[in-house]
Image (cartoon, helix red, strand yellow):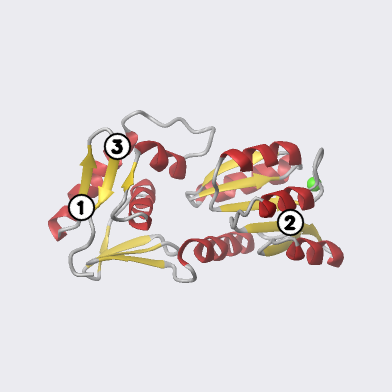
Amino acid sequence: MRILIIEDDPVLADGLTRSLRQSDYAIDCVSDGSEADHVLLAQNYDLVILDLGLPKLDGFEVLRRLRRRGSKTPVLILTARDALDERVKGLDLGADDYLTKPFDLPELEARVRALIRRGQSGGSSVLHHGVLSLDTVGRRAMLNDAPVELSARELGVLEVLMLRSGRVVNKEQLAEQLYGWEEEVGANAIEVYVHRLRRKLEPAGVVIRTIRGLGYLLEKAPNV
Ligand code: CA
């Protein structure tokens, strides 16, 4: 899951980035509204965390432009404690939730999980694929109701494949979901994760096919 943080206070931006990376989100960070607008034109995110007081273009304008383009990406705005009018205006412009500064990181993370869940699966946090299920909030997978040991990256790859099951997903799309800009993606990293997933899932009949030159495909589950 990939998150864009738009925040001009470097200390807060750094704290948010560290904390969310620890929860295995891919994080990109920009510090002014104009750059944010450009990035949002070029890249899809699962969530945007948006400060309102920003240089060049304020957060309201970034949000207004995003929604005018028809984007439904969940947006969490960060507002000052006593600024009721800011919160109302932000929600009216299409923000999905807000947090008042200063806030506790566990609360932010809970809001982030809730918004991503809402955006991804229309309310339910559990993806199903035949005998396989994946809890996108609890971050765990089950095969025939028994837990499967998966690393955070393996879970990330599996989540993307399950969200697009029956369709081909290429390596670039997988890497995009798993890594932020600053992280190096080893050329074979995705292949390694897929290889490990196969070893764990194929005995139960869950098949990830390689489509040569195109990418990977999680085959339609038989009994669904
Ligand atoms: Ca600010």
- The picture places residue 92, in percent across and down from the top left corner, at 76, 65
Nearest the camera: 17 or 136? 136
Q: Earlier in the sequence, mark 3 or mark 1?
A: 1
For residue 78, the mark is 2
Left/right of residue 54 with respect to residue 142 in the rendered view: right
**Pointers 3 and 1 in contact (C-beta within 8 Å):** no
Q: Residues under labels 2 and 1: Cα distance?
A: 41 Å
Q: Residue at x 31, y 31 (%)?
A: 188
Measuring 45% from the left and 30% from the top, which residue is drawn there?
A: 184
- Crowding around mark 1 (Cα neighbors within 10 Å: few <14, some 14 to 19, many 20+) is some
| Vertical order, 47 against 146 (above or below) | above
Dot 1 amino acid type: Lys
Q: Is residue 210 above or below residue 163?
A: above
Of tags 3 and 2, which is closer to the observer?
3
Residue 43 is situated, as x and y percent measured from the top left of the image, at: 56, 41
Report whether 128 appears left or right of 2: left
Q: Position of residue 95 (x, y in %)?
A: 69, 61
Query: Crowding at label 2, few (<14), some or many (≥20) Cα neighbours within 10 Å?
Result: many
Mark 3 or mark 2: whose residue is earlier in sequence: 2
Instruction: From the image, tell me which residue sits under label 3.
Output: 214
Query: In this view of the protein, can residue 32 be seen by the observer?
Result: no
- The amino acid on which the numbered mark 3 sits, given as a three-letter code, is Leu
**Gap between marks 3 and 1, in whole Å?**
23 Å
Find residue 210 and report its image quarter. Answer: top left
Q: Which is more N-terminal, label 1 or label 2?
A: 2
Q: Is residue 187 left or right of residue 37?
A: left
- Mark 1 sits on what residue? 200
Label 3 CA crowd tier, 10 Å (few <14, some 14–19, many 20+): few
Local SS, label 3: loop
